[in-house]
Amino acid sequence: MTTLAMPAVSECTVDGCSYNHDGCHAFAITVRDHNGHADCGTFVPLTRKGGLPLAEAQVGACLRADCRHNEELECHADAIRVGPDIDGANCLTYSPR
């Protein structure tokens, strides 16, 4: 079995996410396709902060099959950036084929 290194979430500027405090502290995020956007499916809008204390968040799955970085629902970008959107958070590294 071959293991891939999952791309890191190099930056998250979404202040309203419970996982974001001095960087993303989720173990892994999912990028999903919601209303034509590459949304962060792990976005949690609570005032309580959560996640792992020393986590370097990674992309666990990408459901945007039309992204040029997506191969078999796995992200192959070197790293991704997540930023705010009107409905939550988006993958800013998303690029259509």
Image (cartoon, grey):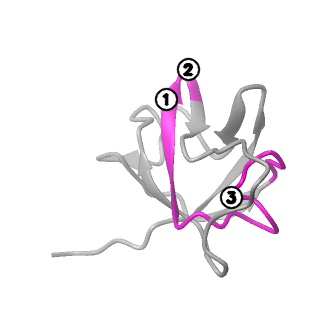
Do the CB atoms of the residues marked 2 and 3 lie less than 8 Å apart?
A: no
- Taking the magenta stretch, the answer to whether it contains residue 25 is yes
Do the CB atoms of the residues marked 2 and 1 lie less than 8 Å apart?
A: yes
Residue found at x 76% / y 66%: 23
Residue found at x 69% / y 63%: 24
The foreground one among 67 and 34 is 34
Label 2 and label 3: CA atoms lie apart by: 24 Å
* Residue of label 1: 33
Circle 3 packing at 10 Å, graded few (<14), some (14-19), many (20+), is: many
For badge 1, the amino acid type reads: Asp
Q: Provide the secondary structure element on which disc 3 rests.
A: loop
For badge 2, the amino acid type reads: Gly
Q: Provide the secondary structure element on which disc 1 rests.
A: strand
Q: Residue furthest bottom?
A: 54
* Residue of label 2: 36
* Residue of label 3: 19
The foreground one among 24 and 95 is 24
- The image quadrant of residue 64 is top left
**Which region is colored magenta?**
13-37
Residue found at x 79% / y 47%: 14
